[in-house]
Amino acid sequence: MSDISSIDEVQAMLAGQGYVCGRALGTVVFLSLTLGRPLFLEGEAGVGKTEIAKAIAAGLGRRLIRLQCYEGLDASSAVYEWNFAEQMIAIRAAEAAGGVDRERLTDELFTEEFLIERPLLQAMRPQAGGAPVLLIDELDRTDEPFEAFLLEALSDFQVTIPELGTIHAPEPPIVILTSNRTREVHDALKRRCLYHWVDYPSFEREIEILQARAPEAAEKLSREVVAFVQRLRTEDLFKKPGVAETIDWAKCLLALDVIDLSPEVIADTVGAILKYQDDIQKLQGSEAKRILDEAKAGLEAV
């Protein structure tokens, strides 16, 4: 499916796209690419599950097709829709011309010309440069009927449009599914995939990630940012900050020409790392100073 021939090459390819990953994740990506198996990634929001699909697509030079899942998503919305507005225009034009053959008109209305392709159908089509990367993002937001449909679609890599027939992918797409685990995804779907839990990175790994994504940040500031965020994750928060928030916060601090963390700076920029008011309130007053002091003490002890 790709020219990647080793785990080291996978890690190097991802690193070239600014995505730093460990050996375990590099291994499961390599196996997914080599065996043509879908890759199922679970983990907290903001740990880099979606980004890895983007990095793989960019690294392999493939098209990225993203199906963003949501509550109520059904098979037709994920596969195709008919362009009703264009169909109505065609009907009016045929009526105006007179002598309408309704059976023939119906056949003409349900053709490729009036078909709106959604992500799953797009992924089954031939693509320049090879099979696309199909990202099915936040699968846990959908319901069980959609999972059952997806299980069938990913088993045979084909979809059926009643008016047109079955469309089969000439080359199976590279499939990556993600879940924030707001609910359990059915075992039958998981069994079709290679599985990996994407956890929060270690201190050293998060420093590497920050250096790759915000290389202009000074080493001292980067270390303080990562130490503070990692210490913040041990607090009782509704939503712990992910790696995405670490990167966003560092970029905010750079935009403000901050060279050293302080309680005042944290108070001014807390919206970059915490997204819920209850969590922000917990960081008010002396709490930010306490966490910052503990983070800096930990750095000095290293």
Image (tube, rainbow, N blue to C red):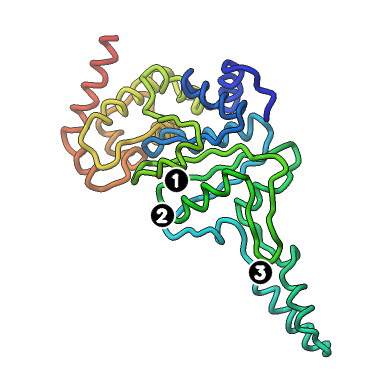
Query: Residue 174: which quarter of the image?
Result: top right
Residue 271 vertical position relative to residue 59 in the rendered view, above or below:
below
Residue named by callout 1: 138
Amino acid type of the residue tagged 2 in the rendering: Asp
Callout 3 environment at 10 Å: few (<14), some (14 to 19), or many (20+)?
some
Residue shown at 31%/22% (left/top)?
227
Secondary structure type for disc 2: loop
* Residue 108 rendering spot, x and y as whole percentages: 77, 73
Secondary structure type for disc 3: loop
* Residue 106 rendering spot, x and y as whole percentages: 73, 77
Residue shown at 49%/45% (left/top)?
137
Residue named by callout 2: 143
Callout 2 environment at 10 Å: few (<14), some (14 to 19), or many (20+)?
some
Q: Nearer the viewer, mark 2 or mark 1?
A: 2
Residue shown at 21%/22% (left/top)?
293
Label 2–label 1 contact, CB within 8 A:
no
Callout 1 environment at 10 Å: few (<14), some (14 to 19), or many (20+)?
many
